[in-house]
Amino acid sequence: MTDLSPVPSATAAAPRVEVMGVRHHGPGSARAVARALDELEPDVVLVEGPADCDHLIEFLTGARLTPPVALLAAVADDPGTSAFWPFASFSPEWQALRWATERGVPARFIDLPAGVTLAARPAAVVPVEDEDDEQDDGPTSPAGVRHDPIAALAAAGGYDDPERWWEDVVESRTEHPTPFSSITAAMVELRAAAPELDAHEARREAHMRQQVRAALKAGHQRVAVVCGAWHAPALSGKLPPATGDAKLLAGMPRKKVTLTWVPWTASRLARAAGYGAGITSPGWYEHLFTTQDDVIASWLVQVGAALRDKDLPVSSAHVIEAVRLADALATVRGRHVAGLAEVTEATRAVLCDGDDSLVQHVTAQLVVGERLGEVAADVPTVPLDADLRATAKRLRLAFSAAPKALDLDLRRDTDLVRSRLLHRLTLLGIGWGDLDAARSRSTGTFREAWTLLWRPELSVAVVEAAQWGTTVQSAATARCIERAATGDLSELTALLEVALLADLPAAASPLLTRVDEQAAHDGDIARLMAALPPLVRAHRYSDVRGTSTAELARVTDSLVVRICAGLPAAVTGIDDDAATVMRGHVDATHAAVRLRADDDGTRTWHATLRALADRPDISGALTGRATRLLLDAGELDVADVRARVGVHLSYGTPARAQAAWVDGFLAGGGLLLAHDRALLAVVDDWVATLPAAAFTDVLPMLRRTFGAMPPAERRNVGDAARALTTGTITGAGAAPPGTVLDPDLVAGPVRTVALLLGARL
């Protein structure tokens, strides 16, 4: 608890309370607060913020916090219920706290405790400023005034943009006097036209008045109060009797909360981020606060540098002309100084040549910005967070608000440990790293490709995960075991794969036991097939990570046997749509069996595929697919496949069944047709001889089949089909040498093939 004992005063004058009504995250307000504090020299500073966070104010000393940062409050037994109170360097509240800590003046927060706020707003993650009802009938309506008093003042001043009004009146003015008395007077009028406060808002103001009374009772003579402009009238002048406020505050529910500082980002201060912090241009406001001279020129110099980074020819002359245009626009519009609107228009016209995409780049990089604040290691937090930060520091992984690519070589010890950390965090729901599976596969077995991005809400995820353990490894292990108790087979195998990647041997053993039990009792072949690939991948890549998986191999091989035994019955009697879904499972199982490379399992699987390919009573989507997989595996020769194609595309078979077989056979591999001209001729003859009604019926399915092929494959197939019209086909089924095809006779089939392939003749 911050010491509230008064600083000895040389005078015995009557106590003075100076209320400074501000706009959250306003650089003009921040400057005005700093000037007012220098003039008043208060012996205590009271700031709007959760009263139970007083013990965290001391961490503003010694540069242990680098804004943007936020106070985080999370309910102890339900960390998902939490709230943030963000601060930027240009936040008036931050400047007031810095002023007090640098001079040794007592400071404290005076709003309702976070435990009370979260008890009143359960099951929600809310920011400090997002506590008002939604706006009703325009900014000057009673509800509109209550929702956004600044917008009401802007409308009264003839502005349609409250940001621009505030910038003109407060943010861009650096001269005296401070605006607080005028702001309070304006708020008095607005509050008179607004609806009465709701119960929560009334309690907030009652609590703030009680804290002002407590400071005066403690003997302080010069009290500075920094609060939102809306609350200034409630805290100014002679305060009402304390009994009414005490009665209003009696019996409020309260929850036990965990409190700490967490890093925040500049973009999260923007209204567009969904956190309702009240500003759309934090980068611009940072510039206004930190730059005293040549504000516009220095800003446009930064814009020029950002555009040159994109290899655009922006010279000093361009910047000078943009400054002149911004100043001219401000003069024409009657503004005493150019604001963000004028600067942006000058940027678009002079530096970007009217290209809005370049303006958006400037907005993202400079106007909004993406900078992550810093919190020192000695700031109190949950043990899990401390372990995470210590581990990340040891592994040289930096927390960044900008996406950062991280390519890991798992043969290196450091990269292997990094990989394990990121997989453990994934298990805990802390999505710091996003694994790019496609990029990882393309770079080889020994590599992983991650993208790291730290978002403020991950701090809540860390607090929430702290219930599972004090270290990342112990928490991930406990979370794995807990999820294993309720997961189905596919969830268990996916969980087991990640547990092995994360090197959690204490979790792998019970997970394997659960997988074995579930597989033995689960009669759904589709679920068994979905469960196989993660198990095989985990076993296949275990040598990379040094993980012993002998028991995993046993479970995997037994799963293959169960799949092969149950698949023939599972595909009986299903329609083409269900068969198409099952075909996906067959493909995944085939890939897994190939990756497992177990001779017994491979033979059993190939025998199962051959049995499917020979069955006339199941969907062609499956028999065609089984035939194709056997051909790719070398279990069928090309001549046998051609014969099977001829049988399945012969007269007597319904056209839709023929199309389903073609779809199953060709899906994912058009090059087969391009390189086997005889096979292409068989398919072409089938299409050319379809009756008109049957052709119309199967056309959507055929277009789906050929449309799913990559463009290069479609071109190759199209070239091969075009060659059919020139008499250049060779091999079985080809026309005899010297045969000349009649263009009129082949024109119809050629148009048909072109329609299927989406080609233009």
Image (cartoon, rainbow, N blue to C red):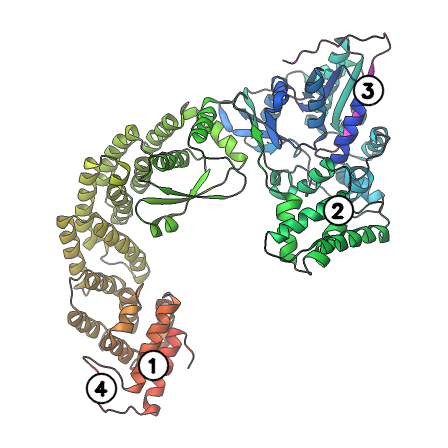
Quadrant of the rendered structure where residue 521 is? top left
Position of 344 with respect to 571 (left or right) is right
Q: Which residue is mark 2?
A: 297
- Amino acid on which disc 3 is placed: Leu
Comes first in the chain, label 2 or label 4 = 2
Determine which of the numbered discs, if any, sits on residue 735 in the image: 4
Comes first in the chain, label 3 or label 2 = 3
- In whole angstroms, how far apart are the C-alphas of marks 2 and 4? 78 Å
Residue 370, image x, y percentages: 59, 41
- In whole angstroms, how far apart are the C-alphas of marks 4 and 3? 103 Å
- Front-most of residues 180 and 655: 180
- Amino acid on which disc 4 is placed: Ala
Determine which of the numbered discs, if any, sits on residue 40 in the image: 3
The magenta-colored residue range is 2-25
- Front-most of residues 582 and 373: 373
Residue 656, image x, y percentages: 30, 70
Mark 1 neighbour class, 10 Å CA radius: few under 14, some 14 to 19, many 20 or more? some
